[in-house]
Image (spheres, grey):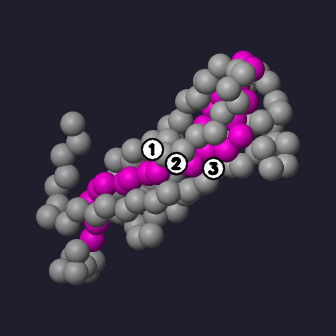
Amino acid sequence: MRRINTHMVGVDQGSMILFSDFEHDGEMWTGSGARKLVTPVGFSEHFLSPPSVHVSVSMWDLDKRTNARADIAADAITETGFQIIFRTWGDTRVARMRVNWTAIGEVRGDDDWDV
């Protein structure tokens, strides 16, 4: 369990289309085997330390003729941002993917200052 040591807790969140590969015959739609996409995300304000980040799929568009295989995670989390890692494999064909994310962590308050 993560314990937050400050009275100021910040929550940042967002939603984004990771890709729309069916529009231009991109790798997630036309490829096969192991495929990976890394997407950087910046926070709207800095956290005091790396926050806890949750990533979830909010829309997926998959080919019905292939198996649905997907792995999504937050990685490389810092005070200023993180990376969304999306992976698929085998014969899976992903036309498009939208994700939502939430970051929760310590933030600087108005009364906090450095001497």
Residue most extreme to the front: 64
Q: Are marks 2 and 1 in contact (CB under 8 Å)?
A: yes
The answer, for residue 84, to whether it is visible in the render is no
For mark 3, give the secondary structure: strand
Could you tell which of marks 3 and 2 lies nearer the N-terminus? 3
Amino acid under disc 2:
Val
**Residue placed under numbered mark 3 in the picture:** 18
Q: Are marks 3 and 2 in contact (CB under 8 Å)?
A: yes
Q: Residues within 10 Å of mark 3 (few under 14, many from 20)?
A: some
User: How far from the left and from the top, in percent, is residue 16?
Assistant: 56, 56
Could you tell which of marks 2 and 1 lies nearer the N-terminus? 1
Magenta-colored stretch includes residue 99: yes
Residue, x 71% and y 40% (percent of image)?
Answer: 95
Q: Is residue 92 left or right of residue 14?
A: right
For mark 1, give the secondary structure: strand
**Residue placed under numbered mark 2 in the picture:** 99
Q: Is residue 17 above or below residue 91?
A: below
Q: Is residue 62 left or right of residue 28?
A: left
